[in-house]
Image: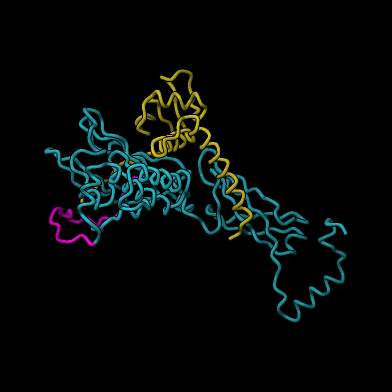
Chain colours: A cyan, B yellow
Amino acid sequence: MEFRDYYKTLGVARNADAEEIKKAFRKAARKYHPDINAGPEAEAKFKDVNEAYEVLKDPERRAAYDQLGQEPLRGQGQYQPPPDWNGGFSFSQSGPHEGEAFSDFFETLFRRGAGPTSGAGAARGPDSHGRIEITIEEAFEGAKRTLSLRSPVIGPDGTVSLQDRTVSVNVPRGVAEGQHIRLAGQGAPGTGGAGDLFFEVAFAPHPIYRPDGKDLYLDLPIAPWEAALGSHVTMPTPDGKVDLRIPKNARAGQKMRLKGKGLPGHPKGDIYATLKIVNPKADTAEARAFFENMAQQMPFDPRAHLGG
Amino acid sequence: MKKTTLRSEVVDTLSLQDLCRFCHADEAWVIELVEHGVLDPVGGTSSNWRFVGESIRRAKKARRLNRDLGVNTAGVALVLDLLEERDAVMRRLALYETP
């Protein structure tokens, strides 16, 4: 397991007082909060910051941590890495959630019975949250994911161990970004039964499409003659090829709507194709002659509206 | 490693109780969010409120902002509105930044 330098994570000196630590934490928490700063890096950073604060805000934990000294942590003999500890994926995306695992370093050293996982009383365990990233194509076809989860589990004797398990999640066709998928009874355990496990669906960045709800936006490159004369172009979409009519004298930036070709569902989304006129390169003598000919033949001043 | 295969379902609506469990909050807090217009449930009285789509996402965000950053309800309402405006602007900006 890896040693964690919690002072470095929060950017404070080892002799920082409680106020400084709180201030540093609040600042970092605002900066990296996953709801304010999307992206996996901010998310990981936010979790690190919370873990560091979880230890440093508590005088006892901090004292214990200080005793470990600085890395490398060797021959201390006071901790045993759990078997198979390098399992990787943790399913919560923020803060010290109920039922969430921090780093192995934290879980091994600081999660000793008492902690955010205990105290549920005779109630059902709390719901847990995670995130599933799918491609836009998968939203059309449906997807299946097998996820490894790691969560702290309280044993009958009150000790806490990390449990790894895998769950299969079916992402149905037509799911929209931000929708949640529920796995009933797969959340954190409690004396009154386990809570539910929820996954929020996110779309992976796509090289062509930008999603907005059920609609998809893209840039559609067309040749100058296709724009000027009007034409039919064949455009691939995740739902199959479609024939799109370009009107005569189409302008760059003009938006074409392909009704019902967006993400599936009730109602279906649309595709909005923004026309982008792309010039062929004049890199042969023939092409240059052609452009020169056009320049002479066509009285066209694209800057006429600028005046002067 | 234990392997489990389970039925998964897309969440369409949540009741007030479901939503409280979903975001680890009590009813008073959710009602406050409704009163501030952060959440917009379907149904007349709180006992038959149904939270759908965007309200579920917003409740989750609101809870995290409240819990992680100590933002109060009025602040959460403001932050969520501004974040939505920002996201809309970012999406528009993305239209002009061709990859």
Q: Residue furthest bottom?
A: A285
| Left or right of residue A245: residue A39 | left
* Foreground residue among A39 and A228: A39
Q: Which quarter of the picture shows residue A213?
A: top right
Say if A153 sits above or below A65 in the image.
above
Quadrant the N terminus of chain A occupies: bottom left
Q: Can you see residue B11? A: no
- How many numbered dots are placed on residues in this image? 0
Q: Can you see residue B45? A: yes
Q: Residue A278: x percent and y percent? A: 69, 65
Q: Residue B41: x percent and y percent? A: 48, 26
Q: Residue A18: x percent and y percent? A: 33, 42
Q: Which quarter of the picture shows residue B30?
A: top left
Our reading of the magenta stretch's main secondary structure is loop
| Left or right of residue A190: residue A305 | right
- Can residue A88 be found in the magenta stretch? yes
| Left or right of residue A24: residue B6 | left
Report the residue at 24% width, 39% height from top.
Answer: A115
Quadrant the C terminus of chain A occupies: bottom right
Say if B64 sits above or below A208 in the image.
above
Report the residue at 49% width, 23% height from top.
Answer: B35
| Left or right of residue A223: residue A140 | left
Q: Residue furthest top?
A: B45
Report the residue at 42% width, 54% height from top.
Answer: A41
Report the residue at 14% width, 60% height from top.
Answer: A75
- Can residue A83 be found in the magenta stretch? yes
Q: Residue A221: x percent and y percent? A: 65, 61
Say if B16 sits above or below A60 in the image.
above
Q: From which residue to which does the magenta span run?
A: A72-93
